[in-house]
Amino acid sequence: MGDLEIRPTVEDDIAAIVAMLADDPLGAQRESPGDLRPYLAAFERLSTDPNQRLITAVRAGRVVGTLQLTVIPGLSRRGATRSVIEAVRVHADDRGSGLGTQLIQWAIDESRRLGCALVQLTSDASRTDAHRFYERLGFSASHVGFKLQL
């Protein structure tokens, strides 16, 4: 794993990231890797927002993982800043290699560095393997999440 680089995403990473987002039963229903225009527009918005960190894991010149870390200042918890981990993906060929753990640990370490008091994430209710993974890393399923499609 010593050859792994975890770095900010660059535009050239987007096609590989979108392919990873689409490479599972849920992503296959909601992603469109054949049309990168909306993803490139989103990347532009993310790149200019100081509270967003879009991260790419690269090994031997190949994109093997990604996540988004959002920093949210707030009033609750005595004015605590929190971070939210989103869109964690590991390339199918690299699952089970420890890469997911390294990505999440990077996000936790970065959250600490940024002064966050809490790291949170959501995971689709159907992703039971992911739930076990996050619990092994110390996360607890302490809340129920709700979403409203617009």
Image (spheres, rainbow, N blue to C red):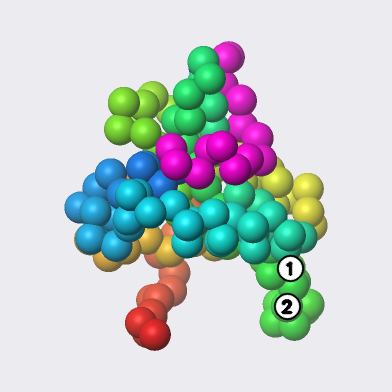
Q: Residue at x 56, y 37 (%)?
A: 12
Badge 2: how crowded within 10 Å, few (<14), some, or many (20+)?
Answer: few
Q: Quadrant of the C terminus?
A: bottom left
Q: Amino acid at mark 1?
A: Thr
Relative height, residue 19 to residue 81 (above, below): above
Q: Nearer the viewer, residue 64 or 72?
A: 64
Q: Along the line of sight, which residue is nearer the eye, 68 or 106?
A: 68
Identify the mark nearer the N-term, 1 or 2: 2
Q: Residue at x 74, y 72 (%)?
A: 73
Q: Which span of residues is magenta-colored?
A: 2-16
Residue 6 lies in the magenta-colored region: yes
Q: Is residue 9 left or right of residue 114?
A: left
On the picture, is 17 further left or further right than 96? right
- 47 up-or-down from 8: above or below: below
Location of residue 105 in the rendering, given as x and y in whole percent from the top left corner: 58, 40
Q: Where does residue 64 sit, x and y in percent of width and height?
A: 45, 30
Secondary structure beneath label 2: loop
Judging by the rendered image, the residue that carries numbered circle 2 is 74
Q: Where in the figure is residue 13, as x and y percent of width and height? A: 53, 38
Does residue 12 show up?
Answer: yes
Left or right: residue 20 versus residue 137 is: left
Mark-to-mark CA distance, 1 and 2:
6 Å
Q: Residues within 10 Å of mark 1 (few under 14, many from 20)?
A: some
What residue appears at the point 78 percent right and 77 percent down from the top-left corner?
A: 79
Instruction: Describe the element under mark 1 as helix, strand or loop.
Output: loop
What number is the disc on residue 81? 1
The percent position of residue 113, horizontal first and vertical second, equals 78, 48
Assess whether mark 2 and mark 1 are in contact (beta carbons under 8 angstroms).
yes
